[in-house]
Amino acid sequence: MNITVHRPGDLTSADRAAWTALQSKAHLNGSPDLANPFLSPEFALATGQWRRGVRIAVAYEGGEPAAFFPFQRSATGVGRAIGLGVSDCQGLVHGPGFAWDARQLLRACGLVVWEFDHLVGGQGPFETGASGSFPSPVMDIDQGYDAYLGHLRERSPKFTRTTLAKDRRLARDHGAVRYVHDERDPEVLAILMGWKSAQYRRTGRSDRFAHPWISQLVRRLFHTRSDSFAGILSVLYVADVPVAAHFGLRSERVLACWFPAYDPAFSRYSPGLVLHLRMAEA
């Protein structure tokens, strides 16, 4: 196995296409989690524009790229998962049957350590360094929204009944409810970011959008679009006024939840929950 390390801008178009192909076929190869958009070349390249030390290791077998490992490196050789702090899925993207040694990989990357906090499942060589393992919530709509909603009614009948009733009540009290799955107005993105910043401060958490690199990263990803990747802004409107919104990333088969928020004035209607059901349906 031959490993080369590249700056994001030096990655060839052929390597990027190979990376995307590995993600596109991940569900067929028994590793559907590798299709997560946080593991995509688009996320790595966008992060590389705003963060120093972003590198991408490419492992070749038989002269062909077999795996991609994006990371950030400090001058002292300390490595971090790319976009650590905002990335919800981290690890090495690889094809079926690919085996690697974690220490060998880190040495090839010039790293003495690699820090992560959202390691994707199935990364055995890295899992030995994990301090804990936790489940991730997933809305599985592979069989269609009606099947998903039917299962939700069986598992959580009160929650489902209440949320759907609040959707109807919102329309009765305030006017027509309209959902836009892929809103392209950047002003609405700014509204969402404002809601989220206020929520962070209100709940005593660090405001991520107070960091310029995160705000710039989100804006760039909002304008990044291809068949295999896009930033998706989904919005719930009432009488043409936004009351809830979510910005996330999608690959071909996965929409990753990232920044959801809503107008607190409408909190009694649980607009965030209503929005997520609309997103699943869309």
Image (spheres, rainbow, N blue to C red):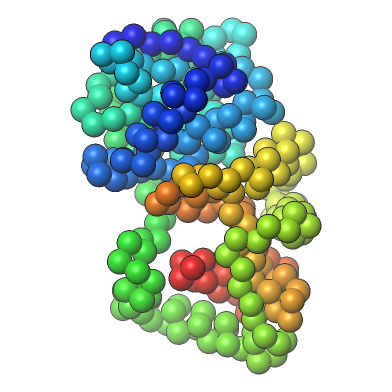
Q: Classify residue 24 as left or right of residue 28.
A: right
Residue in view at x 59 percent, y 36 percent: 85
Where does the image place residue 57, in percent across and percent down from the top left? Answer: 45, 17
Q: Residue furthest bottom?
A: 172
- Asked which quadrant contains residue 149, the reply is bottom left
Classify residue 12 as left or right of residue 85.
left
Position of residue 259 relative to residue 63, above or below, is below
Report whether residue 190 is seen: yes
**Quadrant housing residue 217:** top right
Q: Nearer the viewer, residue 134 or 63?
A: 63
The residue lying furthest to the front in this view is 14
Identify which residue is drawn at 50% across, 39% down.
38
- Decide if residue 133 is in sight here: no
Q: Quadrant of the N terminus?
A: top left
Q: Is residue 276 left or right of residue 119?
A: right
**Picture coordinates of residue 84 (x, y %)?**
57, 32
Give the percent coordinates (x, y) of residue 55.
54, 18
Which residue: 73% across, 38% down?
216
Could you tell me residue 256's position as x and y percent?
Answer: 49, 50
> Is 133 in front, or is 209?
209
Furthest-left residue in view?
A: 97
Q: Name the residue rendered at 57%, 83% in the picture.
A: 166
In the image, taking residue 37 as reference, residue 239 lies left or right, namely right
